Amino acid sequence: MRGKWARLPGVITTGLIVAVLSLSVAGCGKRGNPKPPENKAVTYPKNYPTK
């Protein structure tokens, strides 16, 4: 491959690596459901009034 298309495989590979890394890092900040502190009343989930 020569010319303007010679870099295409490298660009595709780099794009895939960036996409996979960004998706894997995005999931790192997820936490489980909140738990109330000990000896405290549960204040969530709140039931909001409906009209």
Image (tube, grey):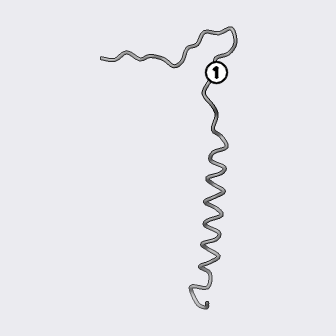
Q: Residue 5, percent across and down?
A: 57, 85
**Circle 1 is placed at which residue position?**
35
Dividing the picture into quadrants, the one containing residue 49 is top left
Residue at the image point whose x is 70% and y is 12% from the top:
38
Dividing the picture into quadrants, the one containing residue 9 is bottom right
In this rendering, the answer to whether 40 lies above or below 9 is above
In this rendering, the answer to whether 9 lies above or below 46 is below
For the N terminus, give its image quadrant: bottom right
Q: Residue 14, percent across and down?
A: 65, 69
Residue at the image point whose x is 60% and y is 72% from the top:
12
Amino acid under label 1?
A: Lys
What crowding class fits label 1: few (fewer than 14 Cα within 10 Å), some (14-19), or many (20 or more)?
Answer: few
**Farthest residue toward the right?**
38
Q: Is residue 21 left or right of residue 44?
A: right
**Farthest residue toward the front?**
32
**Farthest residue toward the bottom?**
2
Q: Residue 30, percent across and down?
A: 63, 38
Q: Is residue 45 left or right of residue 37?
A: left
Residue at the image point whose x is 61% and y is 85% from the top:
6
Residue at the image point whose x is 29% and y is 17% from the top:
51
In this rendering, the answer to whether 50 lies above or below 4 is above
In this rendering, the answer to whether 35 lies above or below 38 is below
Mark 1, secondary structure of its residue = loop
Q: Residue 29, percent across and down?
A: 65, 40
Q: How many marks?
A: 1
